[in-house]
Amino acid sequence: MTVMDHRDQSDPAVVPGWLPGATAPRTDPAPLLPDAEPFRVLGTPAADKADPGLLRELYRRLVAGRRYNQQATTLTKQGRLAVYPASTGQEACQVAAALALRTDDWMFPSYRDTLAVVARGVDPLQALTLLRGSAHTGYDPRATRTAPLCTPLATQVPHAVGLAHAARLAGDDTVALALLGDGGTSEGDFHEGLNFAAVLHAPVVFLVQNNGYAISVPLTRQSAAPTLAHKAVGYGMPGRLVDGNDAAAVHQVLTEAVERARSGGGPTLVEALTYRVEAHTNADDATRYRHAEEVTAWQAHDPIRLLEDALRERGLLDEQLVAEAADEAEAMAAKMRAEFHADPDLDPMSLFAHVYAEPTQQLREQAAQLAAELAAEAEVHAR
């Protein structure tokens, strides 16, 4: 009886000691394993070789990102936003993710990744439209090559894989980058997305921002894996572990993963170790599940401080750059305040748009009911 070998012809030879066939290991797991320690650039000899222009640009964007988080948080307290999941402390991951992509690549953000969306070039008002409660999304995904903010955990992961696979089939060299948190790795969509990505050899990169908690659940209650990056081996893709507060390191790792995917190397799982300094959202009381000492310890490893120290050590940070970065950030915050001060002009009937290509009977009934209620309300106001 002939044993059929279901392995792709490009796969390496069967490991000695294993019988050929479907049960044979497809790849050697050793090259897929992440490093024992998170990859770092800042504070290491590699920082001396980093591109000065890139470091300065990262600094400007980190300063703007911190101010963006502060202003969005304030708008929430003023009732201008319904909810805001701040990425304070995670700005290095957000900015590096945006800078690692080409304009024709695609980003698939989670609900906490509004800063990554803004860093990609989307107007802050548009990026926050969903969290304001005004519309399903405030920007054109096709025009911005950025998927709508995803509030369910990890459902954007298979979407990213599908788009990347479709681009590959079409002969495009587009890469998709999916952003998610450590809590998202506990979801079935994460497993399904990574498994399909590896099997299909899709040009997609997964960035897990491990900020320590899935709302109030610490990582130790979610996973027993050595690191989340180790999960990559089970799917047959490389896992990379990086210091998520080291902007230069995150940018380098993501750039390498994106270019690997673009050149036909397949997917990569990147775990960035970072920390959520603020509460999960404005509706969360983080003091109930973590100590102030923990927050203080992470603040000493702040991404802006790390980059400032590295820039000063190389003589790349002067008072002019500090002032320019601060002024740019404040101008953005002022623009946000001005735009959010005006109440949006909303059309309630737009809720039914872009749900189905052909509205279902139930959707048509709901639209008709709302239209009747709006007409009745308008008649009352007209009296």
Image: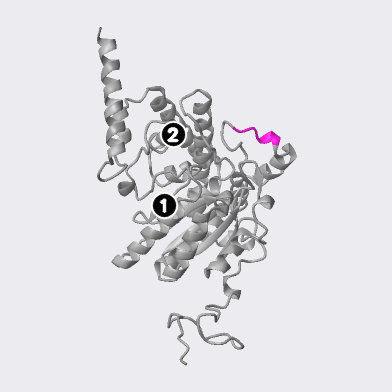
Question: Circle 2 is placed at which residue position?
Answer: 332
Q: Secondary structure at mark 2?
A: helix
User: Depth check: 378 or 116 in front?
Assistant: 378
Q: Is residue 14 left or right of residue 43?
A: left
Among the two numbered marks 1 and 2 on one chain, the one whose residue lies closer to the N terminus: 1
Residue at 66% across, 61% down:
225
What residue range appears in magenta? 284-288
User: Depth check: 165 or 116 in front?
Assistant: 165
Q: Position of residue 56 (x, y in %)?
A: 50, 49
Disc sitting over residue 328 in the figure: none
Which amino acid type is shown beneath numbered disc 1?
Answer: Met
Q: Is residue 326 left or right of residue 146?
A: right
Q: Is residue 285 magenta?
A: yes
Q: Please tell me in which quadrant of the rendered image residue 14 appears.
A: bottom right
Q: Position of residue 381 (x, y in %)?
A: 29, 11
Q: How far apart in space, not on screen, are marks 1 and 2 (Cα)?
A: 22 Å
- Check the picture and name the quadrant holding the C terminus: top left
Residue at 32% across, 42% down:
355
Question: Circle 1 is placed at which residue position?
Answer: 107
